[in-house]
Amino acid sequence: MKIKILFLIPLFLLALFISACSTTVDPADAYKGESAEQIFQKGEEALKDKNYGEAIKRFEALDVQYPFGRNTEIAQLQIIYAYYMSSDYASAEAAADRFIHAHPTSPHVDYAYYMRGLSNYYQNLGVFERLFTVNLATRDLSQIKKSYNDFVMIDKLYPQSSYAPAAHQYTVYLRDIIADHELGVADYYYSREAYVAAANRANLLVRHYQGSPAVPDALVIMVKSYRHLQLTQNANDALTVLQYNYPNSKYVQQAMSQ
């Protein structure tokens, strides 16, 4: 009897899955009896009611059926938002990416960059990480780096955007996370006596992430690695930079000790 129950449950779930797939309506065929204005307005109402699934269906139908309609560009932006609010960050990223490529000169493209940045950031976090504080520098940072680049784009290309202040804060925050990650890699190499790799990684951090709290630690690794490699001039140059920027600090003492 137990074996029969174990087999019945998957079959039941499979039947539900097949039924759900069979009722999926293509955006090109959805809401055929409604005008473009009706589809859009009801999509806006669904969005206001936080019925994000219905909103997405309506806005995607409008995008497919009326690609040059007067509300279609706004609908494309609302698709990004609806996916984001549904926590479907991969789809939100893809929708934002489509908008950026389709409307590179749109006055709303800064919003698409901003939402793509947020979507990339949250893709890097699982449910556990969203609930509890974790050290993101220890994670795979592929999405974090994409997010950082999106916020940098706003910072550089759209400094007057209403999203620019928040984007700038994200660039500072994410830059420090990436720098901490690079420091961890450099420290890993140093602890295993791979001094060339340690010095190179620390040097990269110092050059590309100036102002990050990880920079002085990276300079210490550079000084010590160059000494192990008997590259006296390189070690002295790194020490000079350290002493100039962080005089009488613990970092100078660490660099002087062997």
Image: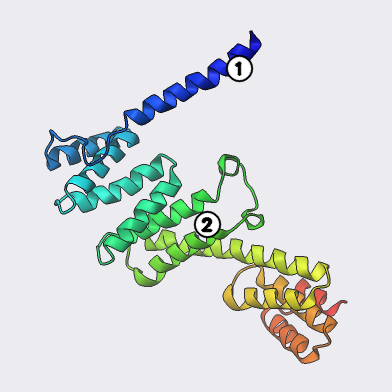
Residue at image location 19% in from the left, 34% down from the top? 31
Q: Which residue is mark 1?
A: 6
Q: SS class of the residue under badge 2?
A: helix
**Lateral position of residue 224 relative to residue 124, left or right:** right
**Lateral position of residue 39 relative to residue 57, left or right:** left
**Lateral position of residue 82 relative to residue 123, left or right:** left
Residue at image location 69% in from the left, 84% down from the top? 241
Q: Which residue is mark 2?
A: 143
The amino acid marked with disc number 1 is Leu
User: Which is more toward the observer, 159 or 114?
Assistant: 114
Residue at image location 77% in from the left, 85% down from the top? 235
The answer to whether residue 249 of the structure is visible from this angle is no
Residue 98 coordinates in the image, percent (x, y)? 33, 57
Q: CA distance from mark 2 to mark 1?
A: 39 Å
Query: Residue 60 bears which disc, if any?
Result: none
Image quarter where the C terminus lies is bottom right
Question: In the image, is residue 51 above or below residue 82?
Answer: above
* Sooner in the amino-acid sequence: mark 2 or mark 1: 1
The amino acid marked with disc number 2 is Gln
Q: Residues within 10 Å of mark 2 (few under 14, many from 20)?
A: some
Residue at image location 41% in from the left, 62% down from the top? 165
The answer to whether residue 27 of the structure is visible from this angle is yes
